[in-house]
């Protein structure tokens, strides 16, 4: 008899334990139910597993159900409806409730982790980056099936989470320290967004890697706006007393800001593409092609005197018939020859003779923001700009000719220490 009682007791204990075979059979039955896709099956099985995890948390706090536990710190208090983040939305699930001995509500660790909204905000930003509008957000998410109820996919929820996430990104992005790296080359350019102008600075470090350093919002590309950007970079650790090459499109406000903030430490290279565009706008269409070719030939020679001579010769040809073109060639002429004076050639010259690199970044900005129909202030423009700049930076490569960067740095330092910088400042 004793043996039989022992056998029965063992059998009872075994029956109380969850059977992995039985659970597998239940899951298999779900999977082969009519009309159930793999996605819905995984979703349902995952939610069931999550409920088991929550119950395990509750058991850790309250002890096993229906068993005395004198050392417990809390007790069960039924269930409540709660929301957790899942697949870019919030899903309504049954939440086990726990109260402490003193009667206060206690939060389950797994529940606290599951309701964090960071994954939801990240998903919203990712959907925005691939072109999903606020109206189409709900349709872009995978179905949860009929059993799971979701919330937080409306247009207003999408916008709210997008604003929250991008506001954090703006704060973090525009406060990053810059003192850890050296940026001998800076490209600065502005682009318009409705009534706003965003001026962006991109640096090239000594190893040839590109970095978006900062962006500022204003109504124009004025000296004050550009100076605010440059001073912000300095405040975050960008060294002032360091020979540096600025590649710009020729805006007068930006040039003045560079001279005011960096003084004699800055050398300026005018974008040759912008300069050629400005020159040919003063000419009839029939003359534009050969003038562009003549400018390219002048900028491709090895010495500054030879290049200056070719450009002066070209300007003299237009003094009588097209005085505007001649004046445009002479305006800032020496600043278009800075790279020649530095002895930069090959692939590195092709990488930094124009502002194309930073304009490509701004192209990403315009692509990502193409679905915006109404700009509500500068803060919104700045949020979208930083988000797009961070996305563009993920795909950055080294500049072509990066192995020549040490020679460029040495040439910059040598030129700053000579009278050439004074000559360039006088021309400006």
Image (cartoon, rainbow, N blue to C red):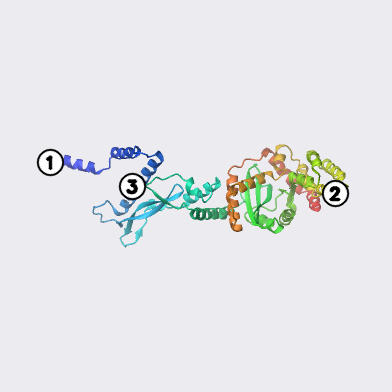
Considering every residue shown, the one lying at the far bottom of the view is 102
Q: Residue at x 30, y 54 (%)?
A: 62
Cβ–Cβ under 8 Å for marks 1 and 2: no
Instruction: State the mark number for residue 52.
Output: 3
Which is in the foreground here, disc 1 or disc 3?
Answer: 3
x then y, percent, for residue 358:
66, 46
Which is in the foreground here, disc 2 or disc 3?
Answer: 2
x then y, percent, for residue 334:
80, 47
Taking depth in this image into account, of 293 and 105 the one nearest to the observer is: 293
Q: Which residue is mark 2?
A: 323
Q: Residue at x 74, y 38 (%)?
A: 345
The image shows a total of numbered marks equal to 3
**Is 284 rendered above or below residue 196?**
above
Taking depth in this image into account, of 61 and 294 the one nearest to the observer is: 294
N-terminal of the pair, mark 1 or mark 2, is: 1
Taking depth in this image into account, of 103 and 72 the one nearest to the observer is: 103
Q: Is residue 128 rendered to the left or right of residue 74?
A: right
| Res. 181 visible in picture | no
């Amino acid at each position: 008899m004793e043996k039989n009682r022992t056998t029965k007791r063992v059998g009872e204990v075994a029956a109380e334990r969850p059977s992995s075979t039985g659970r597998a059979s239940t899951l298999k039955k779900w999977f082969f139910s009519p009309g159930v896709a793999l996605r819905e099956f995984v979703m349902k099985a995952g939610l069931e597993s999550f409920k088991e995890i929550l119950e395990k948390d509750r058991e850790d706090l309250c002890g096993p159900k229906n068993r005395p536990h004198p050392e417990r710190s809390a007790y069960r208090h039924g269930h409540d409806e709660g929301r957790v983040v899942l697949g870019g939305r919030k899903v309504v699930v049954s939440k086990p409730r726990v109260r402490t001995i003193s009667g206060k509500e206690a939060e389950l660790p797994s529940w606290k982790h599951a309701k964090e909204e960071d994954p939801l905000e990240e998903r919203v930003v990712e959907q925005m980056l691939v072109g999903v509008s606020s109206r189409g957000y709900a349709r872009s998410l995978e179905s949860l099936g009929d059993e799971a109820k979701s919330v937080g996919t409306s247009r207003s929820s999408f916008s709210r989470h997008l604003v929250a996430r991008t506001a954090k990104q703006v704060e973090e992005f525009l406060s990053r320290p810059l003192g850890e790296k050296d940026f001998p080359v800076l490209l600065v350019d502005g682009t318009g967004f409705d009534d706003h102008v965003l001026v962006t600075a991109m640096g090239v470090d000594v190893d040839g890697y590109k970095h978006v350093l900062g962006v500022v919002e204003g109504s124009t590309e004025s000296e004050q706006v550009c100076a605010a950007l440059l001073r912000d970079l300095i405040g975050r650790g960008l060294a002032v007393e360091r020979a540096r090459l600025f590649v710009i499109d020729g805006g007068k406000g930006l040039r003045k800001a560079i001279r005011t903030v960096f003084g004699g430490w800055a050398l300026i290279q005018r974008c040759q593409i912008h300069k050629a565009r400005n020159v040919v706008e003063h000419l009839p269409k029939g003359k534009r092609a050969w003038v562009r070719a003549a400018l390219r030939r002048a900028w491709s020679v090895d010495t500054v005197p030879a290049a200056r001579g070719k450009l002066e010769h070209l300007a003299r040809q237009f003094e009588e018939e097209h005085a505007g073109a001649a004046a445009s060639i002479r305006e800032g002429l020496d600043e278009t020859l800075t790279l020649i004076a530095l002895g930069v050639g090959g692939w590195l010259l092709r990488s930094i003779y124009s502002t194309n690199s930073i304009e490509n970044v701004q192209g990403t900005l315009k692509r990502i923001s193409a679905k915006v129909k109404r700009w509500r202030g500068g803060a919104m423009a700045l949020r979208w700009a930083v988000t797009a700049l961070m996305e563009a930076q993920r795909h950055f490569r080294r500049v072509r000719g990066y192995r020549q960067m040490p020679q460029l740095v040495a040439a910059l330092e040598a030129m700053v220490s000579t009278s050439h910088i004074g000559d360039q400042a006088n021309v400006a």
